Amino acid sequence: MTGGGRTGSVTVFLMAALMASAFNPRTVFALQTHAAPEGLYVHQGAHLFLIFSLAAFLFSLRRSRLETEKAWRLLSWGAFLLILWNAWAFAGHIAETFLPESVFIVLPGRTVPALAMQSWLEAAYYVLQMDHLLCLPALVFFCAGLRKLHAVFQENGGTKRVRS
Amino acid sequence: MTFWSLSPVWIIDFAGSLGMIIVSTMCLATTRKIIRKAPENALANYLLWFTGALFAFSVSRSAGHILKHILFFSGHFDLWKQLSPISGSINTITFVIIGSVTLYFGRMETIMNRMARDREKISSFSRELLELNKDIESIVSERTRVEMALRFAHDVRNPSMIIGGLVRRMKKNIPEGNPELKKIDQIQEQVKKLESLITKLDLSEKKGKWKFSALELSALVEEAMAAVADEAERRGVILFLDRAPSPLTFQGNRHLVKIALMHVLRNAIEACGSGDTIQIVTEAGEKTVLVRIEDNGPGIPPEMVQHIFEPFFTTGKGTTGIGLPYVKQIVEDHNGSIELASSRDKGTSVVIVFPPLLGELSRKG
């Protein structure tokens, strides 16, 4: 087959595909549908991105030796706890997806549901749901670090290198 | 089968959500205080972005969690199933914002360090300029005083010599034994004293009284190189120092010698192009200390080399044309010497030599 003949075949195929898609829109893949799991994937991806960026933050602090200063040491602890929280929440979302609705049971005379402990997965979900035990201390460390930085700024008016 | 009540989880979730809102608000308030204190500080602005993102994340997440509990206990939990995706999406967006702001910290830190280094450099240059200004003021005042003294000595010397001559001539005409001869001798003696005083004044004033101290040539060369390093970097010129292994001490004025070295280095940098090299060598000569500055730039035309140390002569590249004559004067004031050799397309070499001790100029400041 000559080069011109091959080009002709491709053109015929593309024209046929266009015609087919015009008469049968369900087979067209140009528009991607956004099904429910996609939101979860994006959310989990955001958790991973946050872990990466906070790790980069810690690495920058370590490299710059700012970590030896009290304010930055407090901020780095905050970042470290936030990394742990991200991993914790990431695992919590995974556990949630595997958990069937049937394990949530409202016991007679109670308003708040209980969890039927059928396997380690329910136990893991139960513990992983208490993620505020990590993210709240992380924020407390950030707040303490910022207050220390504020004290340093008050001392030198932000004109010198920020040391504490 | 065991049942674990979700009450503890919900209590921690509710209290934690409230705590998140409170603490993140405190973070934002603290950062606002910092930004009020230093509104133009790069770090303060960065912190505002960071805590702003943290606040948005905490509030959106916690508000969602609290709303979920409220809707559950008020019997409208079905509404939460509609609101949940919106709350989750906002959370995801805030994660990405915090991540992006945090990721920028590395770059931010580099900029901050660069600014701190530049600030320290400017402050150091400013201190040196102040000291230099003081030295120049002292030199100018000293030179003015010396010139006035020399002029006075010159003006007084002539009349005293004339008086001396006339007195000697008068003495020849007075016969021996004349009582006036004794008075003539006394006048002659006083004139000699006056001449001797003028000669002493002449010599002592020519010496001057600059601030001289023991200096180390290699260290001074390094300081001068540091001062012109940025300029060299901008022009793509490579500075290379071959430092003498032992200290090269001599007596001199630190600021003046440094200025002389900086002038020579700047001239070399201006003459060179990108990729050219300036090699600086410090070494001990025979009873001397010297620095050799060699570049592989385009060189100076031979007709210009012989006039290079003349005041107001310029190659056309410089700005004032007083640089190298000034350098020569400084070096000669230190009892040193400067030589320049250049050949077209091969480069220029400047050798500055100082005596290790300043001979008759050895004074300590």
Image (spheres, rainbow, N blue to C red):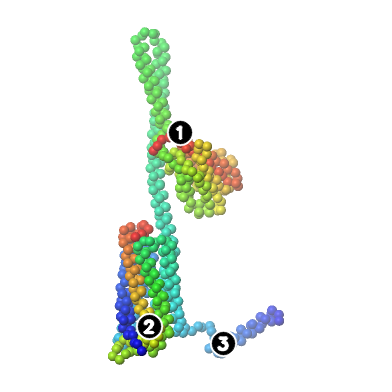
Type of residue at label 3? Ser
Residue underneath mark 3: A21
Q: Residue at x 38, y 72 (%)?
A: A82
Three-letter amino acid code at the position of disc 2: Ala
Give the crowd class for mark 1: few <14, some 14-19, many >=20 residues within 10 Å: few
Give the percent coordinates (x, y) of residue B282: 51, 44
Labels 2 and 1 positioned on one and the same chain: no
Say if labels 2 and 3 share a chain: yes
Q: Which mark is residue A123?
A: 2
**Res. B40 image quadrant:** bottom left
Residue B55 location, quadrant: bottom left
| Secondary structure state at the residue bearing disc 2 | helix
Quadrant, the C terminus of chain A: bottom left
Q: Position of residue B26 (x, y in %)?
A: 31, 70
Please tell me which residue is depicted at 55% across the width and 41% down the height of the picture.
Answer: B340
Q: Residue at x 35, y 78 (%)?
A: A130
Host chain of mark 1: B
Which residue lies under the disc numbered 1?
B359
